[in-house]
Structures are given as structure tokens and as C-alpha cells.
Image (tube, grey):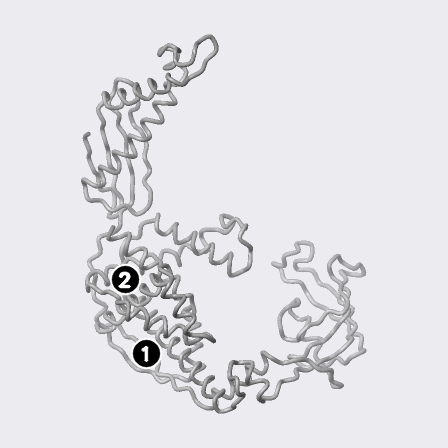
């Protein structure tokens, strides 16, 4: 077997392979001979069909089958002998495939880039320092009250945030349009669930009142016959209800796992959860700044095969997030919506894998357990969560990846200029959300770990 490897880009290789004709032809002949033993054909007894007939009838198909197997086997041998680390599957095409001639084929593949890490020395990193105040706790408890609020009828006019029960019918001109009417519909003013401008016109309405509401459908409205159209809605307000916030009493407190209903214990638990959330938001903000600095310092080429794999994963996540169902065909979602994010995640994964490899980072079982115990604190039965994670190899692998990534970020932080910045609880959460950092950490770490293992395979 003759092999030549051409470098067509920093991450692309073109392998040309030549296999002696005798090897292929002998393999084809042997396969045809085996087939002849079982072939049934009119006019011949089983196993007695002449080889000339067998070759004429099945020769092309058998040769294609054998050549496919030979090309795959020789491709694997070629990348092994030349120490190539493929990223994804190759494109293999036969250049010469004729009986009596050497088989020649070309395999084009992407490989993992060779990464020589550049330091992020000089990068400016802001590290939030967050203090959760008693006022923050009061606001959180008010939020919990609103989330558990009921509704009660009020005599006053409707206000923003009230729930109104309405009958309505929509008209284009003087004609009612399909799907534009309902009875007994419960609408929270300010929820944004109706056409822009509709809900605001209900402010000030009283129970029993008739209203005429004029709106314009958005240009991008899903029903094309309504998009951009001026419409009139005739509305009957059946009821106006205001939020009935629950009292912070023992019954309310017990809903949140404080079985004795003690207010001080409840406030302490709420504050502890807020501190944990704030610290996570601060850590995520630091992490994202570090990763951006790492990418900026190391603009490595990214294999398109890995980007496509990541794109498909992001599509599945999006389908799940928007409740499109397990049977939804994610190929309907355009690649362009996810390509930039996919490329960024692949780049970060490759760079973090190199940091972990370069600094010989590892995660012990004790460190994995400590991380699991930290994550489990947000659940009602932390011990049950710990036992589940530690008994599940896949979950442990994800947590191991999270620990390794945290260690890699800590190593990189030592190279940067870190400035502590005081932030309120709300500021820390808003900053983290703005950077898109509120994500499923386990999935992201698992992908990084998987790329690490592939790279070193």
C-alpha cells in the first residue's frame, strides 16, 4: 500500500492511497466464489451456477462492496501510520476502481488543530463581590408571595397586573375574522399575551363595562391574512380581579420546606439560597470573561465537522426548550441560527482541553463528591441527589468535567488582572443574564470533557 498525505489547510489533510490490484481482485474473486455456493438461479442446481454467470450478474455489486471495505480499512491504517487525529468522518472517493488496475482513492479529512496556548496575561477581569442584604431578602419573599398569589374580585377600575375576564370579538372593517373571538377569557394586564396595545386599553375598565379596542396587528404576525391589518375588538369586561397576596404565615412558610413554619428559619434559608445564587452568578461572570480572553488570545482554526455536531446539539436543546416535542425534525431549524454559538463553544472546548492537558489537571473522587454536594444544596433532599449522582457514571463524568473546567479557569485567572467590583444581588444576576451565562452547566462541561477525550484519543 502506497500512501501520501497532503496538507491543504492547518486542519485539513488529503490522503491518497494506492492498493495493489491483485489484493483487491483476489478479494473480489473469493467473495464471488463464496456467493456462488448459495446462489439459486433458474436452470441450475444450487451451487452449480457457472462462475462466468455469477461474475456477470453479481460482479459489479460485489466489487463495490469489497472496494468500500478495503478503502475504509486502508484509511484507518493510513491515519494511524501518519499519526493523524481526525475530527469527524472523512470524505472518501475512489479515483481508479477497475479490475486489473491498482485501486486508488482519496480521503479528505479534518483533524484537530495543534494548539500552542498563548497566555491571557494582561486581560482585565472583573470579579463581582456580592452582598445579600435584608432588603434583598424582603424583595425575594415578596416575589415568592406573588408567585403564590390568588385572585379576588375588586370594585375598582382595572390596573396593570390585574386579571380581567372578558368576552371579545375582533373585526376587520365591519367583518368579524376567524379566530378573533372568545368568551370568559382570563387575561392578566401587562402579561404581553395579546396583540401590542390591546391590554393597555383595558386599564381603567370596570366589571360589566363594554370597551371598543383598536389595534394594528404586527407586520410579522403568524396569521398572514391579519399581518399589518388594523382591527377593532368589541370587548365585554365580565370581572376584574386583583392579586391576593398570601400572608407570610406558618402555612405559607411550610410550602418551602420549613416544616415548623418558623419565620426566622425561613428567612435564613431564603438568604442562603440567594447567596448561593449570587455566588454562582459571580463565578459565571468571571468564567465568561476568562473564556472570552482565552478565545481572543488563541484564535485557533475550528474543524467544521465539530461545529456541525455542536450545531445539531444546540438545535435539539432549542427544540426541547420550546417544547416542540421529541418527534420534531430539528433539520427544519436553520444552521445559521446556531453556527456562531456552535463555533464559539467548540473553540472554547478545544482550548480548555489543552489547558487541562498542559497543566495535567485531574479531579479526584473526593472533589467530585464535594461538587455534587454543592449542587445538591438547591434540592429539597440533598442526600438523595448526592447518592443518585455518585451511583451514575454518566452524571459523575459530567460533574468531573465541571470540576476540571473550574480548575482550568482558576489556572487562567492567575494570568489575568483581577479587579473586585462590589455589586448588589440584583446587579449580579442581571450582569450574568446579560452575558447569557445562566445555562445548564452540566451539559456544557460534558461537551468540553468529550472533546478532551477525543483530542487525546
Which residue appears at 30% of the width and 34% of the height? 72
Which residue appears at 62% of the width and 81% of the height? 149
Q: Few, some or many C-alpha atoms within 10 Å of disc 1 (few <14, some 14-19, many ≥20)? A: some
Asked if 94 appears above or below 293 in the picture, the reply is: above
Q: Which of the image's four quarters has the N terminus?
A: top left
Asked if 369 appears above or below 322 in the picture, the reply is: below
- Among the two numbered marks 1 and 2 on one chain, the one whose residue lies closer to the N terminus: 1
| Residue 297 image-quadrant placement | bottom left
Q: Few, some or many C-alpha atoms within 10 Å of disc 2 (few <14, some 14-19, many ≥20)? A: many
Residue carrying label 2: 352
Residue found at the far top of this picture: 43
Percent of width and height locating residue 103: 26, 25
| Residue 104 image-quadrant placement | top left
Residue carrying label 1: 127
Label placed on residue 19: none
| Residue 158 image-quadrant placement | bottom right
Asked if the residue under mark 2 is in contact with the one under mark 1, i.e. CB atoms within 8 Å, the reply is no
Q: Give me the C-alpha separation between circle 1 and circle 2.
A: 20 Å
In-image side of 251 versus 199 (left or right) = left
Percent of width and height locating residue 55: 36, 15
Percent of width and height locating residue 178: 75, 57
Which of label 1 and label 2 is nearer to you?
2
Amino acid at each position: 500500500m502506497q500512501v501520501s498525505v497532503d496538507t491543504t489547510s492547518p486542519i485539513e489533510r488529503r490522503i491518497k492511497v494506492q492498493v495493489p490490484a491483485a489484493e483487491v481482485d483476489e478479494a473480489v474473486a473469493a467473495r464471488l466464489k463464496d456467493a456462488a455456493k448459495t446462489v439459486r438461479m433458474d436452470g441450475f442446481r444450487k451451487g452449480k451456477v457457472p462462475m462466468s454467470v455469477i461474475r456477470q450478474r453479481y460482479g459489479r455489486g460485489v466489487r463495490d462492496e469489497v472496494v468500500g471495505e478495503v478503502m475504509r480499512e486502508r484509511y484507518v491504517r493510513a491515519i494511524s501510520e501518519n499519526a493523524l487525529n481526525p475530527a469527524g468522518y472523512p470524505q472518501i472517493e475512489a479515483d481508479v476502481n477497475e479490475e486489473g488496475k491498482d485501486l486508488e482513492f482519496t480521503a479528505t479529512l479534518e483533524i484537530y488543530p495543534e494548539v500552542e496556548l498563548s497566555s491571557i496575561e494582561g486581560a482585565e477581569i472583573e470579579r463581582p463581590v456580592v452582598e445579600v442584604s435584608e432588603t434583598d431578602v424582603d424583595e425575594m419573599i415578596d416575589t415568592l408571595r406573588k408567585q403564590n398569589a390568588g385572585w379576588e374580585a375588586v370594585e375598582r377600575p382595572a390596573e396593570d397586573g390585574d386579571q380581567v375576564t372578558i368576552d371579545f370579538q375582533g373585526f376587520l372593517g365591519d367583518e368579524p375574522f376567524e379566530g378573533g373571538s372568545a368568551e370568559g377569557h382570563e387575561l392578566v394586564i401587562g402579561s404581553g399575551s395579546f396583540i401590542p396595545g390591546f391590554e393597555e386599553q383595558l386599564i381603567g375598565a370596570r366589571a360589566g363595562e363594554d370597551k371598543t379596542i383598536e389595534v394594528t396587528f404586527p407586520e410579522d404576525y403568524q396569521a398572514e391574512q391579519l399581518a399589518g391589518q388594523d382591527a377593532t375588538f368589541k370587548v365585554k369586561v365580565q370581572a376584574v380581579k386583583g392579586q391576593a397576596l398570601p400572608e407570610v404565615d406558618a402555612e405559607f412558610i411550610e410550602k418551602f420546606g420549613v416544616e415548623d413554619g418558623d419565620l426566622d428559619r425561613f428567612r435564613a434559608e431564603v438568604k442562603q439560597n440567594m447567596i448561593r445564587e449570587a455566588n454562582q452568578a459571580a463565578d459565571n461572570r468571571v468564567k465568561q470573561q476568562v473564556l472570552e480572553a482565552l478565545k481572543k488570545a488563541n484564535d485557533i482554526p475550528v474543524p467544521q465537522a465539530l461545529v456541525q455536531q455542536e450545531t445539531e446539539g444546540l438545535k435539539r436543546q432549542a427544540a426541547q426548550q420550546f417544547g416542540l416535542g421529541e418527534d420534531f425534525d430539528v433539520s427544519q431549524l436553520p444552521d445559521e441560527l446556531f453556527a456562531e454559538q456552535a463555533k464559539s463553544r467548540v473553540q472554547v472546548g478545544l482550548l480548555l482541553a489543552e489547558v487541562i492537558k498542559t497543566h495535567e489537571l485531574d479531579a479526584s473522587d473526593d472533589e467530585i463528591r464535594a461538587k455534587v454536594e454543592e449542587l445538591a444544596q438547591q434540592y429539597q433532599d440533598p442526600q438523595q441527589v448526592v447518592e443518585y449522582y455518585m451511583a451514575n457514571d454518566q452524571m459523575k463524568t459530567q460533574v468531573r468535567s465541571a470540576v476540571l473546567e473550574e480548575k482550568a479557569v482558576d489556572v487562567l485567572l492567575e494570568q489575568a488582572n483581577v479587579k473586585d467590583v462590589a455589586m448588589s444581588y440584583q446587579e449580579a444576576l442581571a450582569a450574568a443574564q446579560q452575558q447569557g451565562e445562566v445555562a445548564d452547566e452540566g451539559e456544557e462541561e460534558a461537551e468540553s470533557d468529550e472533546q478532551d477525550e477525543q483530542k487525546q484519543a
